[in-house]
Amino acid sequence: MGIREPLAEMGCGLPHALEVMGERWSFLILRAAFNGLCHFEEFSQELGIARNILSSRLTKLVENGVLARTPCEEDRRKIEYRLTEKGLGLLPAMLALRQWGERYVEDITPNLVLVDCRDGQPVQPITIRAQDGRELSWSELGWQTPDKIGQPVDRHDVTHVRSGFPSEAGDCR
């Protein structure tokens, strides 16, 4: 089927993910939550975000199951926003975006490095891996319908697929 993915196919998770996370404040709130912030005032102070925008984004993240809104155990009048399993599932995407920014944006020198707690060594870059663990490049990827899983893919067979994904880097068929 090639690397082109029909965007009209609603089985694609990307439009749904962008509906939940598709703007910068949601990502920055999520980053803050991964760094241990959990109260409205903490998010507001750390991010410098307007209160109405913060409230709106937190509500959307809660409605979409990325954060859970619960009363604080120490003070039931306070509310905490905690990452859910669904929110924790965004960690690889968040790290991939951070690593991309550190690699391609000029004049960024990270003041913190993400390390493995066990040995204190930096984590490896987020990559795409095959079923057998091989790291895959763009040219080794292709889309396949579920009924044909396990069959090799010819990336150049795009006669029945139309989308915004180029079949080769720089090739805009």
Image (cartoon, rainbow, N blue to C red):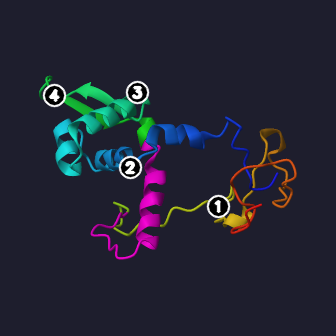
Q: Position of residue 95 (x, y in %)?
A: 43, 57
Whether tag 3 and tag 1 are in contact, CB under 8 A, the answer is no
Q: Which residue is mark 3?
A: 63
Whether tag 2 and tag 4 are in contact, CB under 8 A, the answer is no
Instruction: Specify the quadrant of the image occupied by residue 168.
Output: bottom right
Q: Which residue is mark 1?
A: 133
Disc 1 residue crowd, few under 14, some 14–19, many 20+, Cα 10 Å: few
Regarding mark 2 in the picture, which secondary structure is present there? Answer: helix
Q: What's the CA distance linking mark 3 and mark 1?
A: 35 Å
Q: Please tell me which of labels 3 and 1 falls first in the chain.
A: 3
Q: Residue at x 51, y 42 (%)?
A: 18
Give the amino acid at mark 4.
Lys
Depth check, mark 3 against mark 4: the one in front is: 3
Q: Please tell me which of labels 2 and 1 falls first in the chain.
A: 2
Residue range of the region highlighted in magenta in the rendering: 88-115
Q: Which residue is mark 2?
A: 24
Disc 4 residue crowd, few under 14, some 14–19, many 20+, Cα 10 Å: few
Q: Position of residue 51 (x, y in %)?
A: 21, 37
Q: What's the CA distance linking mark 4 and mark 1?
A: 45 Å
Q: Which residue is mark 4?
A: 78
Q: What's the CA distance linking mark 3 and mark 2?
A: 18 Å
Regarding mark 3 in the picture, which secondary structure is present there? Answer: helix
